[in-house]
Image (tube, grey):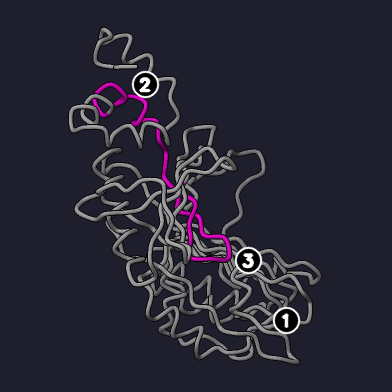
C-alpha cells in the first residue's frame, strides 16, 4: 500500500488507527513520512501524559506510552544476544541500532552491546523527544531491586541499577523486599549508589530495617517524593533531613517527641520549606494526637464551620 496516493483525510484516518509502535517504525520510511505522522497525529500526541522506561529487575527497559486511561507498550531495549542476529537496522539520531521483531510480542525490540548501552538509549530518547515533542514527561523507573538487600545469614551480589542522565527525564527507584528476615546490610554501597545518581524524582523503600542510618547529606533526602515502609523507620532522620515535597511514612513505631520537633520546625519555617504534604501511618502503636496538637499550639476549628482546604498534586 502506498500511503501517499490517498487523500490527506484518508491518510490521517489510517495513521490514527495504527499503534504507536507501528507509527514509530513507519516514521523511518522517509523524512516526509515522519513529518506527515507528526503533523497529522499532533492532537493524539498531545494526549500523551507520559512515557515510561520501566526496568523490572534489569537494565533492559520496556518503553510504554500513557494516555489518560490507557497504557501501550511501544518497544523494549535489551542487551544483544551473542549471535548478534537482528531483523533490521535503523539510524536514530546518528546512531545505528539493531532491531528485532518477534511473534511473541507486538512491538519492536532495540538491541545494544554492553559498551554502547548508554549511547543507544540516549539516541532512542532523543528521537522520542523530536517525534513526540519535548513537552512530554519521561520517567525511568527501576523496581524490585532485591539485590540491594541480603539475608542476615549470607551475602548477595550488590546490584547497582543503571540510571541514565537524559533530557526531560525523571528518575524513580523502588527498593522492596517482603521477606521478614531481610534487612539493608551494606549501607556504604547503598549510599554510594545514591551519591552517584542524579537527584531522584521518587524513592519507594520497603524493608524491615537498616543496619545503620543514612548520611544526613544523602540524596535520599533530596528526592522530590519518598514512600518509606519499615518496621523500624529511619525516623527521626527523615523528619530531620528531608528536603523534598512529599513524604509518606509507614511504620510500627514513632516517638511523639520526634513528631513534635518536626512540626515545630515546619510551622516556624526553620526547615522543610519545600514540603507540601506529609502522611504518617502507625500500624500497631497509638499516636497521642492531643498531646502532639497541644504541644505545637494547634488551633481548633469550630465543628460547625467549614475548615480551610489545600490540595497538592501527588508527585
Q: CA distance from mark 2 to mark 3?
A: 59 Å
Front residue (pair 145, 106): 106
Q: Is residue 51 magenta?
A: yes
Residue pictured at 67% horizontal, 67% vertical:
250
Q: CA distance from mark 2 to mark 1?
A: 51 Å
Q: Quadrant of residue 179?
A: bottom right
Q: From the image, tell me which residue sits under label 3.
A: 293
Q: Is residue 50 magenta?
A: yes
Which of discs 1 and 3 lies nearer the camera? The answer is 1
Front residue (pair 98, 24): 98
Locate residue 238, reporting x and y percent. Answer: 53, 76
Q: Quadrant of residue 165?
A: bottom left
Q: Which residues are magenta?
A: 38-63
Locate residue 14, reporting x and y percent. Answer: 38, 16
Which of discs 2 and 1 lies nearer the camera? The answer is 2
Numbered marks: total: 3
The answer to whether residue 192 is left or right of residue 293 is: left
Kind of element beneath mark 1: strand
Amino acid at each position: 500500500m502506498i500511503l501517499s496516493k490517498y487523500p490527506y483525510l484518508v491518510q490521517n484516518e489510517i495513521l490514527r488507527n495504527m499503534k504507536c509502535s507501528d507509527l514509530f517504525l513507519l516514521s523511518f520510511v522517509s523524512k516526509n513520512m515522519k513529518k506527515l505522522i507528526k503533523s497529522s497525529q499532533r492532537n493524539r500526541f498531545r494526549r500523551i501524559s507520559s512515557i515510561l522506561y520501566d526496568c523490572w529487575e534489569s537494565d533492559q527497559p520496556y518503553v510504554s506510552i500513557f494516555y489518560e486511561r490507557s497504557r501501550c507498550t511501544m518497544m523494549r531495549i535489551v542487551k544483544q544476544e551473542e549471535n548478534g542476529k537482528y531483523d533490521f537496522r535503523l539510524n536514530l539520531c546518528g546512531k545505528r541500532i539493531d532491531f528485532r521483531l518477534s511473534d511473541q510480542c507486538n512491538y519492536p525490540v532495540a538491541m545494544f552491546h554492553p559498551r554502547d548501552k548508554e549511547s543507544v538509549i540516549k539516541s532512542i530518547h532523543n528521537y522520542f523527544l523530536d517525534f513526540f515533542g519535548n513537552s512530554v514527561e519521561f520517567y525511568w523507573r527501576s523496581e524490585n531491586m532485591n539485590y540491594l538487600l541480603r539475608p542476615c545469614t549470607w551475602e548477595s551480589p550488590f546490584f547497582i541499577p543503571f540510571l541514565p542522565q537524559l533530557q526531560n527525564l525523571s528518575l524513580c527507584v523502588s527498593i522492596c523486599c517482603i521477606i521478614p528476615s531481610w534487612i539493608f546490610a551494606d549501607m556504604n554501597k547503598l549510599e554510594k549508589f545514591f551519591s552517584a545518581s542524579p537527584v531522584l524524582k521518587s524513592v519507594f523503600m520497603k524493608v524491615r530495617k537498616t543496619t545503620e542510618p543514612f548520611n544526613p547529606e544523602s540524596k535520599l533526602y533530596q528526592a522530590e517524593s519518598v514512600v518509606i515502609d519499615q518496621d523500624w523507620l529511619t525516623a527521626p532522620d527523615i523528619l530531620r533531613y528531608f528536603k523534598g515535597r512529599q513524604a509518606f511514612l509507614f511504620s510500627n513505631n514513632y516517638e511523639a517527641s520526634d513528631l513534635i520537633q518536626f512540626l515545630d520546625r515546619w510551622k516556624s519555617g526553620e526547615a522543610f520549606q519545600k514540603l507540601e504534604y506529609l502522611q504518617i501511618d502507625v500500624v500497631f502503636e497509638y499516636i497521642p494526637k492531643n498531646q502532639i496538637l497541644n504541644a505545637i499550639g494547634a488551633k481548633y476549628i469550630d465543628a460547625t464551620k467549614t475548615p480551610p482546604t489545600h490540595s497538592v498534586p501527588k508527585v
